Amino acid sequence: MDRLFQFLEGTLTPIAGRLATQRHVCAIRDGFIGAMPFMIVGSFLLVIAFPPFSAETTFTFGQWWLHIAHDYFNEIMTPFNMSMGIMSCYICTCIAYNLAQSYKLDALPTAMLSLMTFLMIAAPMEDGKLSASYLGGTGIFSTIIVAIYVTELTRFLKEHNIGIKMPEQVPDKIRQSFNLLVPAVFVILTIYPANLILQSQFDMLLPGAIMAIFKPLISASDTLPAILLATFIAHILWFAGIHGAAIVAGIMAPFFLYNLGMNQEALASGMPLPHVFIEAFWSFFIVLGGSGATFALVLMYLRSKSVHLRTIGRLGIVPAIFNINEPIIFGSPIVMNPTLFVPFVITPLVNATIAYVATRSGLVGGVVSLVPWTAPAPIGASWGAGWQLSNAVLVIALIVLDLVIYYPFFKIYEKQLIQQEEAEAAAESELTAQNSQ
C-alpha cells in the first residue's frame, strides 16, 4: 500500500493533473457539455417516436402511444433530426468557442469559421441539398479535429501578425469580422483541397477517411476489457484525490456519442443495437450513486454505529440518489483510505462486467437515449433504454450485490472509527473531570 501511495503521489497524480487542465482536453470536454441540452432533448423525442411496446400489445396506453407515434412520426422526428441528427455541428461550434476563449481570441467568429469549415468538408451541397451523413454521430471525430485545426490556425496567424490591419477608430465588431477574412482564406486553401482530392480520387469525404482511421479504436472501445480499463483508471485517479470520472468521461465522450448515434440509427432502422458502452451505461450501471458505486455504502452508513459514518450517510444520501457522492468520497474519506480501496475499485468493475454481459445477451436493453447523469439510477437506466423495466431491475440487483461487496470492508472501517471515537470520548471525559476539579 505504501508503494501504491508513492506511485499515485509521485507519478500518476502529476500526469493526471496536467491532463485534466490541458487546454485542448478542457475545450473538448466543455464543448460536449455545451451541446448537451440539444442532444438530451433530441434523444427524448426519439424515445417518443419509437414506443417501448410491440405492435400486438393490448395495453390501452401502449396502443395510444403507438398510434400517435405512427401518425405524427415526421413531426416528432424533426426536432430530433435538428438536434441529435446534426449534433456534430453544435459540438464543433462549442469546442472552437471554448478553445478560442482559452487563447483569448475572438471566440464567436472563430467558432463560426469552424462550423463553416466542418460543413464545407462534411456536407458539400449537391443538387441544392446538404447531406447529413456526417453531421450526426459519424462526424464526431472530424468535428473535434476541425475545431482544433481552425482555432490553432487562427491563433498562429494572429501571433505572426498575418491579417488585415484596421484603424483603431473602426468598431470592435467590424474589426473582428475583418480579422476572420485571412483565416477563412487559409482554411479554404488548406483543408478544402484535401477534401476535394479525397472526393475525386477515392469517392470519399474527409470525415469518411477520419472515421476509417478511428474505426478500429471505436470497435476496441466498446469491448469489455476497454470498459474495465476505463473504469479502473477512473477509480485509481479518484483514490488519489483526482476527479477520475471527469478525466475518463472527457476522453471517452466522442466514443460515447458515436456509439449512441449508431444505436439510434439502428433503432430507427429496426436493427439490433450494436453498441453498449455509452454514457448512460456508465452512469446508471457502473457508478451507482457516484464513482465507486457508493450508493450501497451510503445505505450502510445510515445505520452505522459510528457517529462519523452515520453523519456522513445522512449528509450524503440525497446527493447519492442523484449520483453525486463527493460528500462520501471526501467525508468518509475514501481518498487514500486503504481500508476502502479494494471495494471502491472492485465494485464498479463487477457492475460493469455483469451489466455488459446482460446487455450483450439481451437481458436488458441497450442505450438509445442521452439522459442527464443526475437522474436516479433506476429511472435513468430505464429511460436510457427507451423505458425498459428490465434495466431498472438490474440496477436494483446491482445495488444489492454492491452491499454484499462493501459490507466486510465497511465493518472493518466502522470498527476502526468506533475505537477512535471511544478513545476520543474517554479522553474528553478525563479532561472534563480534571477541569472540574
Image (spheres, rainbow, N blue to C red):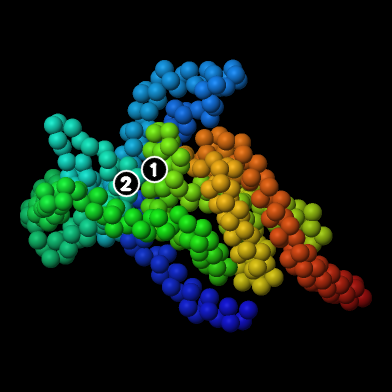
Considering only vertical position in the picture, is 271 above or below 18? above
Q: Which label number is shown at residue 138?
A: 2
Q: Do the residues labelled 2 and 1 touch (CB within 8 Å)?
A: yes
Q: Position of residue 41 (x, y in %)?
A: 43, 35
Checking the image for residue 261, the label placed there is 1
> Residue 260 at x, y = what percent?
42, 44
**Which three-letter amino acid code belongs to the residue tagged 2?**
Thr
**Do we see residue 176 in this rendering?**
no
The answer to whether 431 is drawn above or below residue 352 in the figure is below
Q: Residue at x 9, y 61 (%)?
A: 162
Q: Residue furthest right?
A: 437
Q: What residue type is labelled 1?
A: Gly
Name the secondary structure under disc 1.
helix
Q: Classify 10 Å Cα crowding around label 1: few (below 14), some (14-19), many (20 and above).
A: many
Of residues 312 and 46, the one drawn nearer to the viewer in this rendering: 46
Q: Nearer the viewer, residue 398 or 37?
A: 398
User: Of residues 210 and 158, which is closer to you in this image?
Assistant: 210
Q: In which quarter of the image is the N terminus?
A: bottom right
Residue placed at 82% from the left, 71% from the top?
419
Residue 42 position, x and y percent, is 41, 35
Quadrant containing the C terminus in the rendered view:
bottom right
Give me the residue at 53% from left, 17% from top. 64
Q: Is mark 2 on a helix, strand or loop?
A: helix
Q: In this view, does 266 lie to the left or right of 244?
A: left
Taking depth in this image into account, of 168 and 416 the one nearest to the observer is 416
